[in-house]
Image: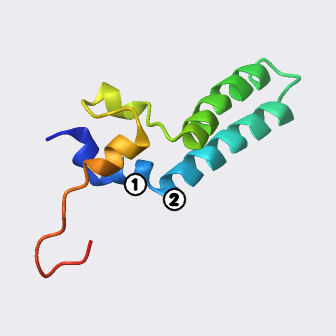
């Protein structure tokens, strides 16, 4: 099965998934700012930029590692239609 068809990938590509990644990035950056005087501050800020940018740019960096597409729009295009009688 292509990772792009999994419920996890579909969540990551949804508006909620994009918001969750952006919020996680902001939280990491905020933690880095709070800890800026320690050795963990700058690395946290740098790492926080990755999920923030991924959410803003609509990409899923995990997807290509698991055999799916990078682009959120390509992941959404992989959506499996709901079975008859079931809601999507």
Q: How many marks?
A: 2
Q: How busy is the neighbourhood of tag 1: few (under 14 within 10 Å), some, or many (20 plus)?
A: some
User: Relative to 32, is 83 on the left or the right?
Assistant: left
Which tag, 2 or 1, sits closer to the chain's start? 1
Residue 88 position within the rendered picture, expressed as x and y whole percent measured from the top left: 27, 71
Q: Nearer the viewer, residue 78 or 53?
A: 78
What's the coloring here?
rainbow
Q: Which residue, given by chain and number where applicable, does mark 2 sit on?
A: 16
Q: How far apart are marks 2 and 1 (CA)?
A: 7 Å
Name above or below for residue 15 compared with residue 27: below
Residue at the limit of the structure toward the right, as seen here: 37
Residue 6 position within the rendered picture, expressed as x and y whole percent measured from the top left: 25, 49
Q: Quadrant of residue 44?
A: top right
Q: How busy is the neighbourhood of tag 2: few (under 14 within 10 Å), some, or many (20 plus)?
A: few
Residue 47 position within the rendered picture, expressed as x and y whole percent measured from the top left: 64, 26
Residue at the (61%, 34%) spot, across then down = 53
Residue at the (56%, 52%) spot, across then down = 20
Q: Which residue, given by chain and number where applicable, does mark 1 sit on?
A: 11
Residue 84 position within the rendered picture, expressed as x and y whole percent measured from the top left: 10, 76
Q: Nearer the viewer, residue 78 or 47?
A: 78
Q: Are marks 2 and 1 in contact (CB under 8 Å)?
A: yes
> Of helix, strand and loop, which one carries label 1?
helix
User: Relative to 87, is 24 on the left or the right?
Assistant: right
Q: In which quarter of the image is residue 80?
A: bottom left
Assign the N terminus to one quadrant of the image. Answer: top left
Residue at the limit of the structure toward the left, as seen here: 84
> Of helix, strand and loop, which one carries label 2?
helix
Check residue 71 in the rendering and tell me which mark sits there, or answer none.
Answer: none
Residue at the limit of the structure toward the top, as seen here: 39
Name above or below for residue 56 compared with residue 45: below
Residue at the (66%, 32%) spot, across then down = 48
Residue at the (49%, 53%) spot, across then down = 17
């Amino acid at each position: 099965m292509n990772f792009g068809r999994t419920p996890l990938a579909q969540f990551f590509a949804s508006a909620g998934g994009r918001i969750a990644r952006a919020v996680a990035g902001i939280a990491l950056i905020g933690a880095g700012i709070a800890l800026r005087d320690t050795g963990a501050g700058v690395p946290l800020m740098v790492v926080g930029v990755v999920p923030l940018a991924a959410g803003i740019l609509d990409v899923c960096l995990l997807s290509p590692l698991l055999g799916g597409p990078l682009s959120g729009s390509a992941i959404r295009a992989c959506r499996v239609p709901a079975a008859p009688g079931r809601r999507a």
